[in-house]
Image: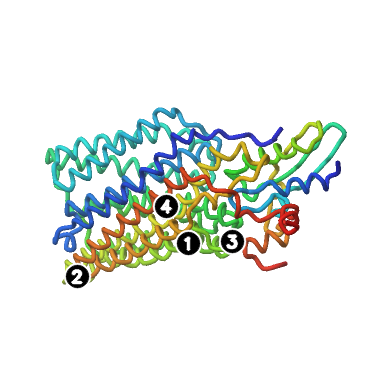
Amino acid sequence: MKASDVALALREVYDPELGIDTVSLGLLYDIEVEADEVRVTMSMTTPNCPMAAAIAHATETKLETIAEGRGVEVQVVHNPPWNVGMLNADARKWLGLPEN
Amino acid sequence: MTALAVRESPPLNVVLPFFLVAPLGLIAAGIMLALAGEDSVTAVTTPELLAATHGAVLGWISLTIMGALLQLGPVLLGGRLISHRLARLQLWLHVAGVGLMLLAFQAWRTEALVIGGSLTALSFVLFLVNALPAVRWFARGSLVRNYVSASLFFLMLTVAAGFTYVLTLHYGWFPITAGRVAAHAHLGLAGFLALMLMGVSFQLVPMFQLAPHDEPKFGRFVLAWMSIATAVFAAALWTDPPPALRLVAAAALGTGALFWMYDIAMLLHRRAKRKLDIQAKGTLAALIFLGLGIVTGVASASGWPESLVVEHQRLQLAYAVLAIGGWAGGTLIGNSFKVVPFLIWNARYRELAGKQPVPTLAELLDLRLANATLLTLCLAVGAGALAGALGWLEGLRVAGGMFAVAGSLQMLTLVLVAVRRPQARAAMPAPARRIQHEGQ
C-alpha cells in the first residue's frame, strides 16, 4: 500500500458541513505508510472546528478499513493553519470560487 | 488514535429541546401583536406589546442562545456543564415562567406576573450556574469569551431590574417611568442581546463561511465601547433625561454597532464559500435590519419631532421590531438552521462516517422551508416596522400574524431536521465515485 492509495481512500471522507472531501479541501498535510502503521497528519478549515472530532474519527475509521492490519494514527494540527489556497480546483468550483 | 481531544458534547435530548421549543416564543409574540389594541401604536408599554417583546426576547431569543451556549461551550471550547438534569429542569421552568408572564402581561394580572417573573428569573440563575463553567473554558482573553462574559453580566443586570419592576408593579415600591422601562429594555437589548450576537457572530461567521480567522479589526474596541455606552445609557435613562442626552447616548451605541457591522461585512466579503447559504442570508438580512434599527433608534431617542409625541413613540415601536425581530431574528434563524443539523448529524451519523456515505448537514435541512422561514420573517419585520412607524394598527396586526407564521415555519423546519432521514446525495462526488457513476 502506498500513500497515494491512502489519499484515494480518504477522498471518501467528507467535511459534512461543506460537502467536500478532505483531500480536495487540502486538509491532508502528510501521509506515512510503514510496515506496521499508517500515519496521517491533517488539519481543519477552522480552529475550534465543531466537526473536528467527527472528521478525524471518520478518517481513522476509513484508514482502518484499508490498513491491512497496520495500526492507524490520525494527528490533527493547526500549524501551518489551513487557508483557501489549499483547496483544489474541484473544491473551488464547488464553493463558487474563481479558479486560481 | 487521534491527537485531537474528543470533546464531549451534551446528549442530544438535553440541547435539542431548547431549539425546538424556542420558536414558540416567536409564535406567542406574533399572536400578541396580532391582538394589539388601538393604544399599541401610540405607546410601547401596552400589555400586548410588553407581552410580545418578552415572548420574543425571553422565549424565542433567550432559549435559542441558551441552547447554543449549552452545546457550543462544551463542543468548541472543551467546557463541561454542571448537570444535564439541571439543564432539562431549567428549560421547562423557563417555558412555564415565560408562558405565565405573557398571559399575565396580556391580562395585566400583577400577581401572576410575580409568579411568572420569579420562575423566569430562577431559570436564568440556574442557566448561568450551569453554563458558566463551560464559558470559563474559553481561552483566557479570547474575544468570544469576553463578549459572552460581558453579555451574561448584562443579562444578570437585566433580569434583576426586570424582576424588581415586576415586584414593584405588584407592591408599588417606586414609580416605573418610561425612562426606567427603557433602561431595563436597553440593558437587555444592547447589553445582553447585542453583545451576545456580536461575539457569537465573530465565532460563527468565519467558521461557517470559511472567512479568515484574523481578529476583527474593531472587535475589542466595540466590546469596550458598547459595554460602557450601554451602562451609561441605562443609568441615564433611569433618570428620564432630556432628549439631547438620550440622543448622545443612543448615537454612541449606534456608532459601536456600526463598527461591528463593518467587521462582519468584511468577514462576509472575504468568505471562501461564495454561494450564499442560509446562515449568510440570515446574517445579511440581519445587517440590513440593524442598519435601519440604528437610524430609527437614534431618531427615536432624540424625541424627534418634539412637537409630535405620538410619532416619537411610533419610532420606538419600529426600532424594537427592527432590532429584535430583524437583527436578532435574522441572526438566530440563520444560525439555528446550521446548529440543529449539526446536533442531529453528530448524534446520528458521526459513528457511520468513514464506513458508508452519510448525508451532509445541508441535506438534513429542507432548504425551501428554511428559505421560506427567513423570507416570512423579513416580510414580517418590514411590515411591522412600517406599520409601527406609520401608526397603522391593522398593519401591525398583520405583521403579528406573519411573525407567528415565521415561528411556525421555523419550528416545522427544525422538527423535520430531527425526524427526516435523507439519503446522502449532495456532497461533491469524489473522483473515484464519479468515475464509477460515469461508467454505469
Q: Residue at x 44, y 34 (%)?
A: B13
Seen in the picture, residue B120 relative to A86 is either above or below; the reply is: above
Residue placed farthest to the right in the image?
Answer: A35
A9 left or right, relative to B21: right
Residue that numbered label 2 is attached to: B306
Amino acid at circle 3: Arg
Which one is closest to the eye, mark 1 or mark 3?
A: 1
For badge 2, the amino acid type reads Glu
Asked whether residue A15 is in view, the answer is yes
Q: Position of residue A44 (x, y in %)?
A: 66, 47
Compared with B125, A23 (above or below) is below
Chain at numbered mark 4: B
Question: Is the residue marked by circle 1 packed among few (<14), some (14-19), or many (20+) residues within 10 Å?
Answer: some
State the residue at coordinates (71%, 32%).
Answer: B1
Dot 3 and dot 2 residues touching (CB under 8 Å): no
Q: CA distance from mark 3 to mark 2?
A: 44 Å
Q: Which residue is mark 3?
A: B271
